Image (cartoon, helix red, strand yellow):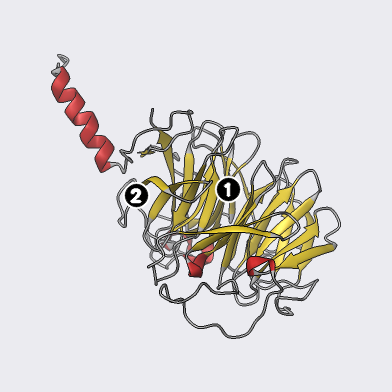
Amino acid sequence: MKAMRVAPFLLFALTLSFGLAAGTCMAAGAADGAPTQFRVDPYWPKPLLNNWIFGAVGGIAVDRHDHIWIIQRPGSLTEDEKAASFNPPRTQCCIPAPSVVEFDQKGNVLRSWGGPGQGFDFPKREHGIYVDPQDNVWIGGNDEVDHQVLKFTADGKFLMQIGAAGKTGGSNDTKLLGKPAQMELDTAANEIYVADGYLNRRVIVFDATTGAYKRHWGAYGARPSDEKMPKYDPTAAPSKQFGSPVHCVRIARDGLLYVCDRQNDRIQVFHKDGTFVKEFFIEPKTLANGSVWDMFLSNDPQQKYMYVADGANNRVHVLLRENGAEVSSFGRSGRMAGEFHWVHNIAIDSKDNIYTAEVDNGKRVQRFTPLP
C-alpha cells in the first residue's frame, strides 16, 4: 500500500485537534520543569486478562517501582456487566476482577488479590489504597460496617488490622475508626496517617508496625465533634469542623500535611503534630458532593503544584501549593477518553504521569501524560 503524505500544516492541525479532544490542558507549562498540562493516553491500561471487568475504582496509588495499584469494587458491578460469571454464563463477557490489581508502566497486570480471609475483615465496599516504601499495601472501606484499615504484603499476605468491622466509637475514640477513606505513611517516624473519614471527622495517627494510637485532630487542629452540622453554604463562615467525608491525607517532603475536606470544598494544611497552618478553597460554589476528592503534589524539589481531583465538577485542577491559585486544569464530565464521571482519586509516578480512578458508574482508570 502506498503511504499517504500529509502536509505539515495539516499534520499540526490534526495533532492539535487530537490533543483538545483527548482532554489536553492547553495552559502554559511550568518554567521549572514541573508539568502543568497533560494529555490522556487512550491505550493505558492494556485490555484486562481473564475476561475481567472493573467496578467502581475506589483508590489508586503508585509504588516505589513506578507500578500502579488500584482497589476496585466487584460488588458494584451490575448483573449485565458481570454476565459471564453466572452458571451458566449469560453472555461472553465479563467476570469481576479481584479487588486489588497491580499494573506495570505498560499497563500489564502483574498481581491481583483480595477478598475475605482468615484473621481480618476485608472491606465490604473497597475505598482507598496506599503502598508504602516497604511495598506494604494499605486499604480501607466505606460501607456502613467498614471501620477498619488493613495492611498486607504486596502479594496479599495479611499483616495488621487497625479498627474493627461493625464497631465505631466516634471522632474521639482512640482505637476504633469510622469508615476511613485514605491513608499515608510518614516513613521517618513510622507513623500511618488516616483520613477518618466517611463517618468520623478527623485525621488520626497510629504506629505503622503495632497499630498503637498516637494522636488525632479535627478541622483547624481542634478537637473534632460529631454534632450535626448544617449543609455546606459558600456564603457562610467556614465550618469549624471537617465535613463528611474527610477524604484524603497527603504528606509533603517539607513535612506539611494536606487534608481533603471534600464536602467543604477545601484543603487544610497542618504540621504533623496537628497544628493548623492554612487552608485553600477550590471551586467554593460547588454544592454537590464537594470539590476536593483527592490531591497529590508534583515531583519537583519544591513540590510547587497540587494536582486536585474534583469529582463533582469532574476536573483535575493544577494549583500552586503556596497559595492555591489555579494554574490550569484538565477534564470535564463525560464518557470519552480524557473525560470523567466522579473522578475519585489521583496518583503520580516518577515520570510525572498522572493516574485517575473513577467511582459511581465511571468504573475506570486513566493515565495522563505531561506535555512540554
User: Label 2, on which residue?
Assistant: 331
CA neighbours of label 2 inside 10 A, class few (<14), some (14 to 19), many (20+): many
Of residue 153 and residue 215, the one placed in the foreground of this image is 215
At which x and y percent is residue 295?
Answer: 53, 52
Relative to 87, residue 71 above or below: above
Side (left or right) of 43 relative to 56: left
Q: Is residue 92 visible?
A: no
Residue type at numbered disc 1: Val
Q: On the image, which quarter does residue 343 sit in?
A: bottom left
Residue type at numbered disc 2: Gly
SS of the residue under disc 1: strand
Q: On the image, which quarter does residue 197 sit in?
A: bottom right
Relative to 48, residue 202 above or below: below
User: Label 1, on which residue?
Assistant: 101
Question: From this viewpoint, which residue is outermost toward the top?
Answer: 2
At which x and y percent is residue 156?
Answer: 71, 50
Side (left or right) of 239 relative to 178: left
At which x and y percent is residue 353?
Answer: 48, 36
